Amino acid sequence: MNNSRPPRPSAPRPPAKGASGRVRLIGGKWRGTRLDVPQAPGLRPTADRVRETLFNWLMPVLPGARVLDLFAGSGALGLEALSRGAASAVLVERDRDLATALASTLARLEGGGAGQVVNADALAWLATANGDRFGLAFVDPPFAAGLWDAVVPRLVGRLSPHAWLYVESPADVTPVLPPDWELHREGRTREVRFALYRRLPAGTDTLA
């Protein structure tokens, strides 16, 4: 008697995060645009549900904003901001393939000239960039690098007096911001804490 059991069929593997063609813009003039994203270590595009929540928070103040996407990766945050009415965006990305893909995406989008891609390390760029001020910044670094404490103090000097700052981190990590920043909104998924901060003193509804 043969007691051997047939092998169980293996479950299909989920697509790798950051795989090419897996990220789409979800709102604004470029809604539905697919972002061609090369795979890269540590790349973790912000989930659609989190992005939708974030941009609902930003809706009243986003039009006309000058935006900095400091760890651009897939471009999902910076390009979403442009799609929804930001005046300009600088997308800083260290990985050359990702930066090239971002530049190609902007080149094929109508109005993509409002975005500028910088292929550079975020900390090095903050140390050497000119004195332009931004009204909104996204900070979503590779989680394993633990860069929040190093980046935030260098970044806040590049932000306007009434700026907004979005920070994404592991669900059990709450980065510390300087005392002149207040938490505006936050949320969590099983893996991620996402939070929007506003610089004090409050009293303006524009990111200009």
Image (cartoon, helix red, strand yellow):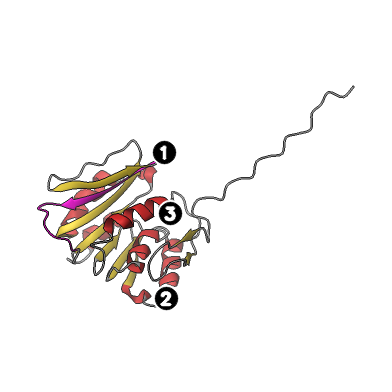
Specify the amino acid type for callout 1: Arg
Above-or-below relation of 55 to 174:
below
Asked whether, in this view, residue 151 is left or right of residue 120, the answer is: left
Asked whether, in this view, residue 80 is left or right of residue 181, the answer is: right
Residue ID for mark 1: 190
Specify the amino acid type for callout 3: Asp
Q: Residue furthest right?
A: 1
Asked whether, in this view, residue 62 is left or right of residue 179, the answer is: right
Residue ID for mark 2: 107
For the residues labelled 3 and 2, the Cα–Cα distance comes to: 23 Å
For marks 3 and 2, the one nearer the N-term is 3
Residue at 39% from the left image edge and 71% from the top image edge: 29
Instruction: Say whether residue 89 is magenta.
Output: no
For marks 3 and 1, the one nearer the N-term is 3
Q: Nearer the viewer, residue 127 or 28?
A: 28
Q: From where the camera sits, is residue 138 visible?
A: yes
Quadrant in which residue 123 is drawn: bottom left
For marks 1 and 2, the one nearer the N-term is 2
Q: How many marks?
A: 3
Specify the amino acid type for callout 2: Ala
Q: x, y (%) of residue 129? A: 23, 64
Q: x, y (%) of residue 119? A: 36, 64
Above-or-below relation of 15 to 26:
above
Instruction: In the rendered structure, find residue 48 and report the number of the disc placed on it.
Output: 3
Judged from the image, the secondary structure of the residue bearing numbered disc 3 is helix
Instruction: Say whether residue 197 is magenta.
Output: yes
Q: x, y (%) of residue 82? A: 33, 68
Magenta extent: 192-206
